[in-house]
Amino acid sequence: MATSGTSSFNLDFDDLIYEAYERCGIQARTGYDMKTAARSLNLLFSEWANRGLNLWTIEERSLNLVTGTHEYTLPADTSNVLSAVVRTGSGQSQQDIVIDRISRAEYLHLPNKTTQARPAQYYVQRTITPLLYVYPSPDASNSYQFRYYAIRRIQDVGAYGNTADVSFRFLPCLAAGLAYYLALKKAPDRIQILKALYEEEFARAAAEDRDTASVFLVPNAFR
């Protein structure tokens, strides 16, 4: 028996919304049914940002630092910064130097934020427009590039023919989550069962959405 030979299954938002309504035991019949489902999807994506790290939303980004400037505006879709380095040089002379993240209070307590040298610390202000502060301010002795892993927001629904900005492993969870959100508005008798299914699907997907690097444990021999 032959197999399809493909592994590209996905759901556009039309199909995803229909699937969620069917789980609620109802059908999407009007334009408002689609609109309210799209709104619930966008809220669901925001909720996922509060549940932990979604690996597919991590991107390596860079920012060229300017001499004497310690404050920078990050892209609006930046949710957080995981880790960062300061890159100097290029080609064979390129070097990435670890830069430490500090808290808001630690940055506030720095006595002279305009001191110039190679940046060694940074603070991320997680406001609606995220800001980056580096310390010391870059000096003119080298060209510095701030390279970092950013957690970005999941993209909005947009057109109903779009596909979701999620890993294929989260499609069952996405359908279950949307069905639960729609049940809150249209199928109250199914709220409990759909919520339980959603939590189960999310826990399963989140457990798999992780790094699989090797870990070595060394016993303490100095006791």
Image (cartoon, rainbow, N blue to C red):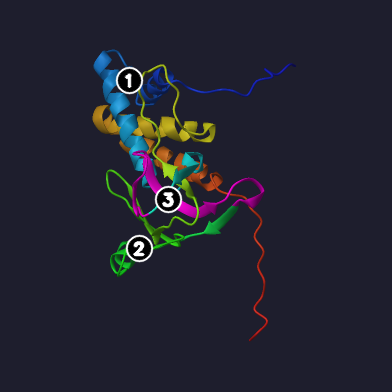
Label 1: state its secondary structure: loop
Residue under the point 54% across and 58% down: 97
- Quadrant in the picture for the C terminus: bottom right
How far across and down, in percent of the image, does residue 131 sit?
32, 49
Residue beneath label 3, please? 81
Question: What span is in magenta?
Answer: 68-94
| Kind of residue at disc 3 | Val
Residue under the point 68% across and 81% down: 221
10 Å crowding of disc 2: few (<14), some (14-19), many (20+): few
The picture quadrant where one finds residue 163 is top left
126 inside magenta stretch: no
| Kind of residue at disc 2 | Ser
Q: Nearer the viewer, residue 58 or 129?
A: 129
Residue beneath label 2, please? 103
N-terminal label among 1 and 2: 1
Instruction: Please tell me whether residue 98 is drawn above or below residue 162 in the rendered image.
Output: below
